[in-house]
Image (spheres, helix red, strand yellow):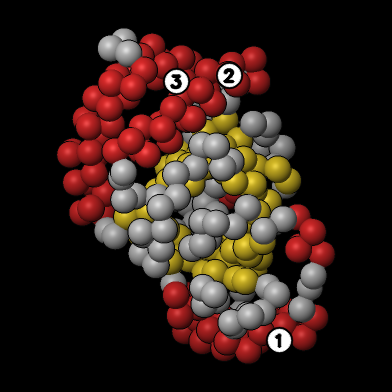
Amino acid sequence: MKRIFYTLFLFSLCANLNSQIIQTRVLYVETENVKEFESAVAKKTQMFNGKGSKEKWFTFKILTGPNAMNYSRVRLAEDLSELDYQNKKGNEYWFKNVPHTSGTQYTWRRNNKASYITGNYDGVNHRRIVFVSYKYSRRKDFWTFRYRIKEVLEKMQQPYNRGVFSLISGGSRPNVVMIRYLYKSYEEEQNWRENEVPKIKSTYKELFGDKAWEMDYNKYRESMVEDWGMTRHHTYMPELSSPRD
């Protein structure tokens, strides 16, 4: 079962954070087929998933974890009903021309109350993605911290997008949450850790009290399932992805 979850959490995320629903799967590609795969995906996207199309697909390369150097393909939707639409011709082209093996498909819903979306970082390629599972009995502690973090980021007017998503279909572990961060590079991610995290703590105390950070963060950590969770990095591949329109 653990192996299943490791595969699940290697999935990358969409470029357009305004989407409410994300449908994801890993694509396994043999080394000798990489060039053919990338060429076929780019062509299929241009033909069937271009500007104005009903299906929006985005491609990422997985950088870390057991499935590093494989790919993730992500479909975006505003609501679940959009997933009823399937482009039959596009699917036929895909299975005929794209060399790959697909993993299981999963569906996520964005939590708007916890997500901080500025739009400033749309188009950047670097992704840091954190996955956790919380205890249902401690759900209030978990979400209180996440909601307050959004208030802090709004107060600071941080430029960095932060999307928070709940797994709604495809998994067998309950209460799984994905937190995605957008940066321009590993260097910028490091600079954020060193320079911005202390400011976040300070602003948190300013908004909620001197002892609020320590109390809320400790409760947040205690609310999560022990010995489970992971961090992955992915890079966005715009040439293999639908345009933003």
Considering only order in the chain, which callout, 1 or 3, is on the residue closer to the N terminus? 1
How many residues crowd around disc 2 within 10 Å: few (fewer than 14), some, or many (20 or more)?
some
Foreground mark, 3 or 2, reads 2
* Amino acid on which the number 2 mark rests in the picture: Lys
Left or right, 192 with reference to 120: left
Residue 3 occupies quadrant: top right
Residue at 43%, 66% in the rendered image:
236
Please give the residue where the numbered disc 3 appears in the rendered image.
221
Residue at 44% x, 44% y: name it: 116
In the image, 149: left or right of 100? left
Q: Position of residue 245 (x, y in %)?
A: 54, 75
Q: Which mark is residue 140?
A: 2
Tell me the residue that label 1 is attached to.
Answer: 93
Tell whether label 2 touches label 3 (CB within 8 Å).
no
- Indicate left or right for 106 with 69 as reference: right
User: Which residue occupies 41% across, 16% down?
Assistant: 216
Q: Earlier in the sequence, mark 2 or mark 1?
A: 1
Q: Amino acid at mark 1?
A: Tyr
- Residue 154 falls in which quadrant of the image? top left
Graded by Cα atoms within 10 Å as few (under 14), some (14 to 19) or many (20 or more), the crowding at tag 1 reads some
Q: Amino acid at mark 3?
A: Arg
